[in-house]
């Protein structure tokens, strides 16, 4: 399995630039010279206690007094940006960290292409920019809320620590967006910062903004699928925002991407270790048929078809996070230079303005799936979604290698792009994982084979038991190859009081 820090490469600019000092003496660690901006400091200091209240109410349930072996960002130098040590989560040093400024950086796309990047909010795009920052910010606390009950059923202390690591870093990502809102958007920025602490995942009257962030993350398999598939939307969106012509947003997102690599690692290895445990148990029991579900479940491991159904669910709701494939909002974000494509500045082969270009979009026309060239500007979301789907495949291939090595005839696959979609071109249609357009009735009749069904959920629940002793791992998940920060796998990653 790949090392976590190679999963997402730090952008070149982060690797090359010089180290920027982080001030740890301030109540809010930062490398943005917070102490010299009294107004900003006051605004953040008044938001801080509300954040802590939110963390205590909606962050991890229990374990707030436990000593957790956490990584804390202490700089933005890629060679040594983090330190490890025991911390109680409410005492975590959430800080504001921007990747170093790239001298001479220019707007990479749209009608302002080639102009110097903005250090202040461009007035004509103020509300569009604020909306992008708010949407990004909203997902961060949402994911913490979704995952808040998982500590109690952690399959090991190693996994519990990884959960909490992801949670505190999503908290820091919220800080990153709140900093931008409060520093650059005056009164309405402060109001948005407050509203980010008030929406609640899954609540009907004041839900989180995007669909997937109101779904439940009820069990550890969901958590691993979420961190593999949904945090990967985070990677793609952050990468697109890292191309922003609004430089403070670009620099914030570039640093967030460094942390994101670990979240993806947790997801990939979490699912991978689950597969490993299943294959090993099947081999040991002499079971070769992956569909011999009853016997496989009796071994206390997760059958592979169920993993596929779980993956199908998380892939489909995450694809919805890209918005409509064809979107005038996305065209405007791109043309204004606020949000690029994946790797925008490095892309070759077009003019980065896309006035005349087209992009192939799969659509449903007269009851048929057809591929149509669409003006590329309007297909920006579709392109990012396609890039995302390609990016998902690497880990899936590695999972399949484990299955193949065990001699089991099964492959995890990605369903058709239109499967189980609620947003965009495929919303309102019923498309099978294989890509057939079906009637609502035909889809409903087969849905239990494609998405987790009630008995799947009952079975998974039956596996969700606490394994809270050092070195203990649940039957359904293999121990990792390596511990965190070179510690052993039986290290006491969380000291539960
Ligand atoms: N659910 O033109 P449309 C992460 C709304 S994850 C509900 O189709 P647009 C993380 C849309 O807001 C990364 N509503 O799409 C991961 C709009 O509403 P308004 C998060 C949806 O605007 C794990 C309307 O439909 N970051 O970091 O081009 C753990 C029409 O919109 C949905 C970002 O998303 C949905 N799924 O694109 C922790 C980046 N989809 O404005 C963290 C910032 C669309 O008319 N956001 N709508 O009321 C964006 O770039 C864009 O807002 C979107 C939507 C790509 C999300
Ligand atoms: Fe995040
Ligand atoms: Fe994340």
Image (cartoon, grey):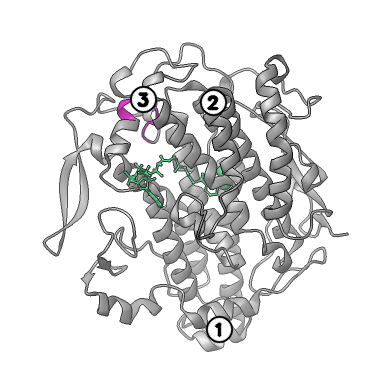
Q: Is residue 258 above or below residue 151?
A: above
User: Is residue 339 located in the magenta-colored stretch of the structure?
Assistant: yes
| Callout 3: CB less than 8 Å from ligand 1 | no
* Residue 240 drawn at (x, y percent): 42, 35
Which residue is the site of mark 1? Answer: 296
Q: Residue at x 36, y 25 (%)?
A: 337
Q: Is residue 222 left or right of residue 445?
A: right
Numbered marks: total:
3
Q: Is residue 474 visible?
A: yes
**Labels 2, 3: front one:** 3
The residue segment tinted magenta is 334-341
| Callout 2: CB less than 8 Å from ligand 2 | no
Q: Quarter of the image holding residue 98?
A: top right
* Residue 462 drawn at (x, y percent): 64, 80
What label does residue 35 carry, if any? none
Q: Main secondary structure of the magenta part?
A: loop
Q: Nearer the viewer, residue 218 or 156?
A: 218
* Residue 60 drawn at (x, y percent): 71, 56
Instruction: Pick whichever of labels 2 and 3 is earlier in the sequence.
Output: 2
Disc 1 vs disc 3: Cβ atoms closer than 8 Å? no
Which residue is the site of mark 2? Answer: 251
Instruction: Pick whichever of labels 1 and 3 is earlier in the sequence.
Output: 1
User: Is residue 174 located in the magenta-colored stretch of the structure?
Assistant: no
What label does residue 337 carry, if any? 3
Q: Residue at x 46, y 74 (%)?
A: 452
Q: Residue furthest left?
A: 366
Disc 2 vs disc 1: Cβ atoms closer than 8 Å? no
Dividing the image into four quarters, tell me where ligand 2 lies.
top right
User: Which quadrant of the figure contains the C terminus?
Assistant: bottom right
* Residue 461 drawn at (x, y percent): 61, 77
Q: SS for tag 2?
A: helix
């Amino acid at each position: 399995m790949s090392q976590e820090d190679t999963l997402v490469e730090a952008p070149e600019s982060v690797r090359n630039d010089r180290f920027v000092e982080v001030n740890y003496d301030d109540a809010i660690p930062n490398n943005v010279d917070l102490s010299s901006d009294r107004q900003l400091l006051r605004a953040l200091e008044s938001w801080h206690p509300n954040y802590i209240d939110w963390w205590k109410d909606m962050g991890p349930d229990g374990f707030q007094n436990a000593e957790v072996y956490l990584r804390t960002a202490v700089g933005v130098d890629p060679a040594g940006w983090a330190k490890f040590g025991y911390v109680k989560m409410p005492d975590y040093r959430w800080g504001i960290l921007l990747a170093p400024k790239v001298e001479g950086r220019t707007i990479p796309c749209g009608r302002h292409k080639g102009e110097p990047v903005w250090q202040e909010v461009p007035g004509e795009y103020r509300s569009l920019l604020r909306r992008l920052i708010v949407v990004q910010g909203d997902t961060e606390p949402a994911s913490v809320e979704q995952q808040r009950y998982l500590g109690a059923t952690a399959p090991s202390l190693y996994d519990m620590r990884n959960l909490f690591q992801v949670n505190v870093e999503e908290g820091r990502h919220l800080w990153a967006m709140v900093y931008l809102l409060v520093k650059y958007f005056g009164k309405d920025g402060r109001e948005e910062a407050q509203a980010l602490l008030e929406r609640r995942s899954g609540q009907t009257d004041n839900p989180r903004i995007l669909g997937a962030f109101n779904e439940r993350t009820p069990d550890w398999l969901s958590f691993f699928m979420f961190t593999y598939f949904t945090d990967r939307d985070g990677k793609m969106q952050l990468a697109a925002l890292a191309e922003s012509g609004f430089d403070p947003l670009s620099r914030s997102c570039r640093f967030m991407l460094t942390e994101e690599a670990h979240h993806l690692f947790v997801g990939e290895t979490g699912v991978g270790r689950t597969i490993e445990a299943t294959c090993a148990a099947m081999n040991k029991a002499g079971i070769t048929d992956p569909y011999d579900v009853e016997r496989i479940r009796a071994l206390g491991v997760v059958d592979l078809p169920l993993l596929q159904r779980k993956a199908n669910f998380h892939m489909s709701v995450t694809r919805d996070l890209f918005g409509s494939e064809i979107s005038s909002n996305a065209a405007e974000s791109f043309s204004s230079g606020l949000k690029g494509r994946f790797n925008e500045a490095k892309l070759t082969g077009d003019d980065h303005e896309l006035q005349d270009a087209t992009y192939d979009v799969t659509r449903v026309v007269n009851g048929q799936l057809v591929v149509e060239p669409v003006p590329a500007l309007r297909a920006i979301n579709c392109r990012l979604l396609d890039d995302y789907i390609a990016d998902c495949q690497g880990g899936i291939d590695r999972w399949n290698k484990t299955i193949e090595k065990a001699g089991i005839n099964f492959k995890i696959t990605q369903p058709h792009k239109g499967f189980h979609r609620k947003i965009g071109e495929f919303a309102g249609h019923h498309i099978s994982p294989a890509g057939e357009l079906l009637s609502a009735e035909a889809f409903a009749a087969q849905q239990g084979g494609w998405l987790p069904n009630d008995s799947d959920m009952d079975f998974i629940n039956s596996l969700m038991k606490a394994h809270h002793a050092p070195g203990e791992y649940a039957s359904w998940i293999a121990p990792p190859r390596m511990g965190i920060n070179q510690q052993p796998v039986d290290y006491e990653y969380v000291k539960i009081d």
